[in-house]
């Protein structure tokens, strides 16, 4: 009888002060150690990466519960989800405090610079959410907003895909995405939904200083209620109309298009 495969949960063994999920990969671990809001309970490395992890941890020594542990590959990989791309770096860290949309909006400066917020409607793949966070950090987006129900949990997989952006871009969970859009409008944001069938190309639009970009799940797109709350729908034109973009690629292209144009 064939043995059924059960993937390992993304939680560490009980050890040390912190008991949050494992973060792994060089960039995710380095960014977490550089973030003064992170509380780290356990640091684990392979023999050939231990020296580098110790150097990264030196600046965060006051927030660490213990020293870097050096273990062999088999023991190291037993701590993490199967097939995790860890690069020999892993830490067990307490989750960050969840940001509130009202606080994020209140903290935004009243400046002439472009300000962008991303909202994800039914985007459930942690790799996609992580990649979108990474693009958001690259183009200085102020936050990524996801619904409380249906969005992926913050795990090592998401953090690895975000490549450190989880430490710098607020990932805001809201009960109701439509209400979040109304709150953004009240804060002066122009709400733009991306839709492959929209009549306008994004590049042709005269955009406001504050822009909230709404992206839907691949295939399903935006929900009807979400579409109705957008001020305008726009598309990212491709050479072949039947070829759609991955949602994280669409987010990166839209961010580049908006961020590089003057308000």
Image: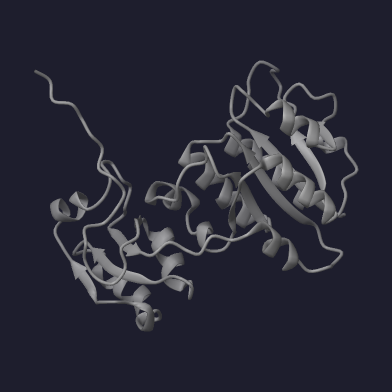
Quarter occupied by residue 196: top right
Residue 146 against residue 38 in the figure, above or below: above
Quarter occupied by residue 27: bottom left
Colouring of the image? one colour
Report the residue at 60% width, 45% height from top: 146
Residue 167 against residue 176 in the figure, above or below: below
The quarter of the image holding the C terminus is bottom right
The quarter of the image holding the N terminus is top left
Q: Is residue 44 left or right of residue 125?
A: left
Quarter occupied by residue 64: bottom left
Q: Does residue 261 appear in the picture of this structure?
A: no
Report the residue at 61% width, 45% height from top: 175
Give the percent coordinates (x, y) of residue 63. Answer: 38, 79
Q: Does residue 162 appear in the picture of this structure?
A: yes
User: 181 or 200, which lies in front?
Assistant: 181
Give the percent coordinates (x, y) of residue 39. Answer: 39, 72
User: 258 or 60, which lies in front?
Assistant: 60
């Amino acid at each position: 009888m064939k043995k059924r495969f059960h993937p390992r949960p993304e939680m560490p063994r009980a050890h040390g002060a912190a008991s949050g999920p494992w973060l792994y990969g060089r960039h995710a671990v380095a960014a977490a150690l550089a973030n003064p809001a992170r509380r780290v309970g356990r640091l684990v490395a392979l023999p050939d990466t231990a020296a580098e992890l110790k150097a990264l941890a030196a600046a965060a020594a006051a927030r660490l519960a213990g020293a870097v542990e050096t273990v062999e590959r088999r023991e190291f990989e037993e701590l993490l989800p199967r097939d995790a791309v860890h690069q020999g770096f892993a830490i067990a860290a307490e989750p960050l405090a969840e940001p509130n949309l009202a606080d994020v909006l209140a903290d935004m400066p009243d400046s002439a610079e472009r300000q962008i917020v991303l909202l994800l409607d039914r985007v459930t793949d942690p790799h996609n959410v992580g990649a979108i966070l990474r693009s958001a950090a690259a183009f200085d987006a102020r936050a990524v907003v996801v619904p409380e129900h249906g969005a992926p949990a913050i795990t090592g997989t998401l953090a690895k895909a975000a490549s450190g952006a989880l430490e710098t871009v607020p990932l805001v969970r809201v009960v109701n995405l439509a209400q979040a859009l109304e709150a953004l409008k009240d804060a002066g944001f122009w709400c733009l939904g991306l839709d492959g069938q929209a009549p306008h190309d994004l590049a042709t639009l005269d955009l406001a200083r504050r822009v909230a970009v709404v992206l839907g799940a691949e295939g399903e797109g935006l929900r009807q209620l979400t579409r109705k709350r957008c001020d305008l729908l726009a598309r990212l034109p491709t050479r072949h109309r039947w070829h759609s973009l991955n949602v994280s690629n669409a987010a990166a292209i839209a961010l580049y298009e908006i961020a590089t144009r003057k308000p």
